[in-house]
Image (cartoon, rainbow, N blue to C red):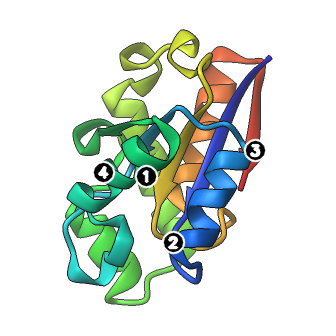
Amino acid sequence: MVNIYTIGFTQTSARQFFETLKQASIKRLIDTRLSNVSQLAGFAKKADLEYFLAQILGAEYVHLPQLLSPAQPMLDEYRKQKGSWSDYKRQFLALIQERRIETQLSPEQFLSPTVLLCSEHEAEHCHRRLIVEYLDRAWGNINAIHL
């Protein structure tokens, strides 16, 4: 069984965020956001997050937008135009299937405690959950842990 952790950073303080990662013994964070430099991201902007992860946890930061992020038009339709979750989910699953993420990643990459990051507070309506579920269908034996 391979554990894949997920976490969002909104509605949480930096202290709470990093303590949660520390308690899970996270050693690698994979950023699934399309944009990781927004001023709205606060402590989760790329440069800050990369520094804090290294200093606080001794953890690695990886950003894989070309593989794990939604396309800008589908993200805009969902967020800015208040599109439906079911449409977004269908589009995103089709996109990661087209990208064949299961061949670009491997279960071995998750043997060291690894977390998928996005902005959404809860995993229920976030593409990070869809990624884990997709990988579980492709690889099997995945245990999703939503922090």
Which disc, if any, is residue 113? Answer: none
| Quadrant placement of the N terminus | top right
- 59 sits to left or right of 142: left
Q: What's the CA distance linking mark 3 and mark 1?
A: 21 Å
- The image shows residue 33, relative to residue 139, as above or below, that is below
The residue carrying pointer 2 sits among few (fewer than 14), some (14 to 19) or many (20 or more) residues within 10 Å by Cα, namely: some
Location of mark 1 (residue): 92
Mark 2 or 1: in front is 2
Tell me, yes or no, whether the two marked residues, 2 and 1, touch with CB atoms within 8 Å.
no
Location of mark 3 (residue): 145
Labels 2 and 1: the sequence-earlier one:
2
Location of mark 2 (residue): 14
Q: What's the CA distance linking mark 2 and mark 4?
A: 13 Å
- The image shows residue 77, relative to residue 116, as above or below, that is below
- 34 sits to left or right of 88: left
At 43% from the left and 19% from the top, the residue drawn is 105
Tell me, yes or no, whether the two marked residues, 3 and 1, touch with CB atoms within 8 Å.
no
Give the image quarter of residue 141. Answer: top right
